[in-house]
Image (tube, rainbow, N blue to C red):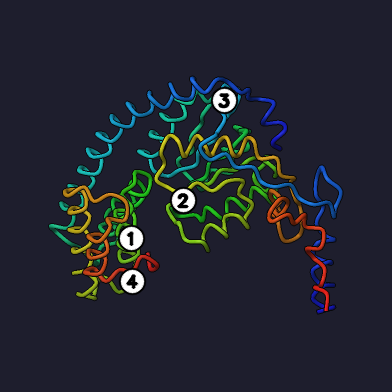
C-alpha cells in the first residue's frame, strides 16, 4: 500500500496545476442542464474539424443561428494541425469519428502542444459513440466537453456554453494534459482533502 | 483558459436564446429535408455500385467505402443511429482483405446496403427500438461490435 501511495504521490508531484497551488482541492464542475445561460457569442471564433461536408454545413448553419463570431471549417483532418495554427481559434470542435485519422490522437496532439496553438485551448468533441469507455478516453485525452450525437441546436449550444464557462484549472503533467478531472468538491460533503491518503486501519 | 473565453462573451436575456431556438427549429425542418435528399442520393449511388459488384477492385471498394462512411457520419449527426452503426460495420467489411474471395462477406455487404435503405424508407430513428434490435440481430451485428 505504501508503495502504491508513493507511486500515486510521485505521479501527482509531477503534475502542476496552473492557477492553483498543487494540493488544493479541485472545484466542482459546473453544468447547466435546462438552466443554460444565454450568451452573446459574437466574440468567439470556432474551428470545426469534420470530414463530412453535409455535417459541416449543418453545423455552420446552427452556429450562425447562435451568432457565433467566426466559424472556420476544416474538411481534411490530416491538415487540421496547420489549419488550427493559422486560424488560432478560441474553441476547436473535433468530430472524434473522423476517417483516416484518430480524433483522439489529434486531441492529444493539441494538448501536447503539437498543433501550433496554446495547449490549453478549449476543445469540444462530438462523437456518435456513447459507450463509457469511449467517453472516458476522450476525457483522458483532455477534452473540455464531450457532445454525444445527434447534434441538435440545444446540444451544440449547451456544449459551447459548458466549454466557455468551464472554470476548472488546467493541468499539465507527464501523463495527462487537460482540464482538471477531479470534481469531488461538494459531492456528499466530501472536499477531497483525504482523497490520496490510505484509509485508516 | 476559460477566463479568457468568458471575457469574450456576455450574458444576454433568455428571450434571445428562445428566439434562436425558434429559428433553429425552422432551420432543422429545412435541414432535415436536405438530409433526406442527401441520404437518398447516397443510397442511389450505393445501389448503382452494388448492381455491378467488383469486390476485387480497390477503386470500386474505395467508392463504396466513401458512401458507407458518409451514411455513417450523417446518420450519427442526425439521430439515425442505425445508419451510423450499420454504416460503420459496412466500412469495416469493405476494408476486410478477404472480401474479394469471401462470398459470405459479399452477401453481408448487400444485406447492409438493403438495411440502410430500409432504415431510411421506414424512418427508423435513434436505435430503432425493438425493430432496430431485430434488424441488427438479423444482420448479426451487436451494438458493441459497431
Task: Give the residue displayed 72% in from the left and 33% down from the top.
Answer: B3
Figure check: A87 above or below A132: above
Residue A182 is left or right of residue B54, and the answer is right
Residue A110: horizontal and vertical position, in percent?
Answer: 64, 47
Query: Alpha carbon of mark 1 to alpha carbon of mark 2: how far?
Result: 17 Å
- Judging by the rendered image, the residue that carries numbered circle 1 is B91
Residue A154: horizontal and vertical position, in percent?
Answer: 45, 36
Residue A43 found in image quarter: top right
Residue B40: horizontal and vertical position, in percent?
Answer: 20, 43
Query: Alpha carbon of mark 4 to alpha carbon of mark 1: how far?
Result: 12 Å
- Judging by the rendered image, the residue that carries numbered circle 2 is A127
Circle number at residue B97: 4
Circle number at residue B129: none
Secondary-structure class at tag 1: helix
Residue A64: horizontal and vertical position, in percent?
Answer: 45, 25
Secondary-structure class at tag 3: loop
Q: Chain of mark 1?
A: B
Considering only order in the chain, which callout, 3 or 2, is on the residue closer to the N terminus? 3
- Judging by the rendered image, the residue that carries numbered circle 3 is A41
Query: Alpha carbon of mark 1 to alpha carbon of mark 3: how far?
Result: 38 Å
Secondary-structure class at tag 4: loop
Task: Give the residue displayed 62% in from the left and 46% down from the top.
Answer: A144
Amino acid at each position: 500500500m505504501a508503495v502504491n501511495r508513493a507511486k500515486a504521490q510521485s505521479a501527482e508531484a509531477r503534475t502542476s496545476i496552473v492557477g492553483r497551488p498543487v494540493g488544493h482541492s479541485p472545484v466542482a464542475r459546473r453544468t447547466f442542464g435546462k438552466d443554460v445561460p444565454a450568451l452573446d457569442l459574437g466574440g468567439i471564433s470556432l474551428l470545426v474539424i469534420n470530414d463530412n461536408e453535409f455535417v459541416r454545413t449543418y453545423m455552420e448553419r446552427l452556429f450562425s443561428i447562435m451568432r457565433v463570431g467566426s466559424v472556420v471549417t476544416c474538411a481534411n483532418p490530416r491538415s487540421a494541425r496547420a489549419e488550427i495554427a493559422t486560424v488560432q481559434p478560441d474553441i476547436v470542435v473535433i468530430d472524434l469519428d473522423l476517417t483516416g485519422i484518430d480524433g483522439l490522437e489529434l486531441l492529444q496532439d493539441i494538448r501536447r502542444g503539437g498543433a501550433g496553438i496554446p495547449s490549453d485551448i478549449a476543445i469540444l468533441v462530438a462523437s456518435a459513440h456513447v459507450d463509457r469507455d469511449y467517453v472516458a478516453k476522450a476525457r483522458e485525452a483532455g477534452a473540455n466537453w464531450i457532445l454525444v450525437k445527434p447534434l441538435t441546436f440545444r446540444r451544440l449550444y449547451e456544449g459551447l456554453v459548458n466549454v466557455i464557462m468551464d472554470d476548472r484549472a488546467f493541468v499539465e503533467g507527464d501523463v495527462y494534459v487537460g482540464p482538471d478531472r477531479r470534481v469531488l468538491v461538494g459531492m456528499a460533503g466530501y472536499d477531497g482533502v483525504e482523497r490520496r491518503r490510505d484509509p485508516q486501519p | 483558459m476559460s477566463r479568457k473565453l468568458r471575457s469574450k462573451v456576455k450574458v444576454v436575456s433568455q428571450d434571445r436564446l428562445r428566439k434562436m431556438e425558434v429559428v433553429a427549429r425552422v432551420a432543422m425542418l429545412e435541414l432535415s429535408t436536405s438530409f433526406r435528399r442527401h441520404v437518398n442520393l447516397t443510397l442511389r449511388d450505393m445501389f448503382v455500385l452494388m448492381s455491378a459488384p467488383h469486390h476485387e477492385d480497390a477503386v470500386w471498394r474505395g467508392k463504396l467505402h466513401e458512401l458507407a462512411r458518409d451514411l455513417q457520419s450523417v446518420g450519427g449527426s442526425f439521430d439515425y443511429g442505425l445508419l451510423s452503426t450499420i454504416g460503420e460495420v459496412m466500412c469495416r467489411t469493405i476494408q476486410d482483405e478477404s472480401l474479394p474471395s469471401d462470398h459470405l462477406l459479399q452477401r453481408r455487404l448487400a444485406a447492409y446496403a438493403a438495411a440502410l435503405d430500409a432504415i431510411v424508407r421506414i424512418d427508423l430513428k435513434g436505435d430503432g427500438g425493438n425493430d432496430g434490435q431485430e434488424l441488427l440481430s438479423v444482420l448479426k451485428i451487436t451494438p458493441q461490435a459497431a
